[in-house]
């Protein structure tokens, strides 16, 4: 990416997801039209900012380590694969016309990507043209497209059963910035099973049928989740790459002397986008960070964050890996600085 293209991109969006001093597990869905103070970025599904090179490099490193660890699919219908790939090509062009040019004819779709200098050529079935010379380093059309934007992407597939309910499963995922979970553990599993490890998820899972229908036929929606981190590393797969010490890879080791601050809020902007024609929904996961020092310097955010931390149940403290350092974090957070 040239310096000029990078300079023309907006700075990364900033979100502070805690709106009350009480932590609760709920859908927390907002329409994507809602403004959070980031201008046009708030309405974009596939954000591309000046931080894009960092997200791109992380994806390339994951693919180099072991692509099957981060990119996988199961029982993905050909019709859904085609719909997803064509949707992404169109959406990138609509949201970022200064970066993408899409040419469509009866034989192929040609997506020219200015910021990566890559060309993606799709056949009428939505898959890569195997004879195109620029495709040698792509795993699939889905992979090629996911390398063009910052967030990770999952595809939830559904089909009605004999009782009129939806059978659902995670059919495809490109996950290079996981927050301590593995794509291979979730692929092929339904919504309720995927989220079962989250403490207090019972009410959300009980409403899974309605949530799935809403993801597919309504929206798009945006929601946020937040956690505790002590490093800026995007990739927190539970299994470290070769030559990494497991404890160092895991992170979340609180050090009050760490500069510029001893912890970060790791948050995810999650966006749902329905593809009702194939009974599927896209689920974008975009990781952001806020330095603890930045939160401490903002009185309202400091108070909300401290209150939310205190409201965590014992199970939630364990799930967020903050149980051992909670009092230290609160002491540091509420100090004058």
Image: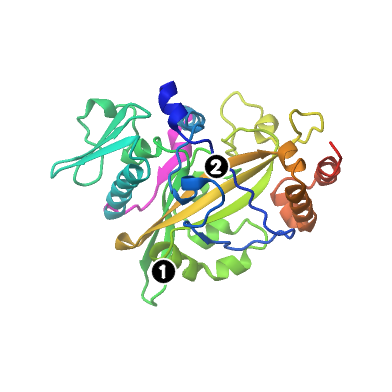
- Furthest toward the bottom, the residue is 163
Q: Based on the displayed image, in which of its 4 quarters is residue 219 positioned?
A: bottom left
Quadrant of the snapshot with the C terminus: top right
- Magenta segment boundaries in residue numbering: 65-78
Above or below — where is 184 with respect to 258? below
Label 1 and label 2: CA atoms lie apart by 35 Å
What residue sits right under mark 2 in the picture?
A: 13
The earlier-in-sequence mark between 1 and 2 is 2
Q: Callout 1: helix, strand or loop?
A: strand
Q: Seen in the image, is 163 located left or right of residue 263?
A: left
Label at residue 166: 1
- For image coordinates 71% across by 38% down, the residue present is 294
**What percent of the width, then of the height, locates residue 151?**
48, 42
Above or below, 246 against 281 in this view is above
How far across and down, in percent of the image, does residue 7 sit?
46, 27
Between residues 327 and 296, which one lies in front from this camera angle? 296
Q: Residues within 10 Å of mark 1 (few under 14, many from 20)?
A: some
Pick the residue in front: 22 or 12.
12
Regarding residue 320, the answer to whether it shows in the image is yes
Q: Identify the residue at the far left of this view.
A: 106
Which residue appears at 57% of the width and 57% of the height? 195
Left or right, 158 with reference to 121: right
Across and down, in percent, residue 164 comes to 38, 76
Near-viewer residue (260 or 183): 260
User: Which label is found at residue 284?
Assistant: none
Quadrant assignment for the N terminus: top left
């Amino acid at each position: 990416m040239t310096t000029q293209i990078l300079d023309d991109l907006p700075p990364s969006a900033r979100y502070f997801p805690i709106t009350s001093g009480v932590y609760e597990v709920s859908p927390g869905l907002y329409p994507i039209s809602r403004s959070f103070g980031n201008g046009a970025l708030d309405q974009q599904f596939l954000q591309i900012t000046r931080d894009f090179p960092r997200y791109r490099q992380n994806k390339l490193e994951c693919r180099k380590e072991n692509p099957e660890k981060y990119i996988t699919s199961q029982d993905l219908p050909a019709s859904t694969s085609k719909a997803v790939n064509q949707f992404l090509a169109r959406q990138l062009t609509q949201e970022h016309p200064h970066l993408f040019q899409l040419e469509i004819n009866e034989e192929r779709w040609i997506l020219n990507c200015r910021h990566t200098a890559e060309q993606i050529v799709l056949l009428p079935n939505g898959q890569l043209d195997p004879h195109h010379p620029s495709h040698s380093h792509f795993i699939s059309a889905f992979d090629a497209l996911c390398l063009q934007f910052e967030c990770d992407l999952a595809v939830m597939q559904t089909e009605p059963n004999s009782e009129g309910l939806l059978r659902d499963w995670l059919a495809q995922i490109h996950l290079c910035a996981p927050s301590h979970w593995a794509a291979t553990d979730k692929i092929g599993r339904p919504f309720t099973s995927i989220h079962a490890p989250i403490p207090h998820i019972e009410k959300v899972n009980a409403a899974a049928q309605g949530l799935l229908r809403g993801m597919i036929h309504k929206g798009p929606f945006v929601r946020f989740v937040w956690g505790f981190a002590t490093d800026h590393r995007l990739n927190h797969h539970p299994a470290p790459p070769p030559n990494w010490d497991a404890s160092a890879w895991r992170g979340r080791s609180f050090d009050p002397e760490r500069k510029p601050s001893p912890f970060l809020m790791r948050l995810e902007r999650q966006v749902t986008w329905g593809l009702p024609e194939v009974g599927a929904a896209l689920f974008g996961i975009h990781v952001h960070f806020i330095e603890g020092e930045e939160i401490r310097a903002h009185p309202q955010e400091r108070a909300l964050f401290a209150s939310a931390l205190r409201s965590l149940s014992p199970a939630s403290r364990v799930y967020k890996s903050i149980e051992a350092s909670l009092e230290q974090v609160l002491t540091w957070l509420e100090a004058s600085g």
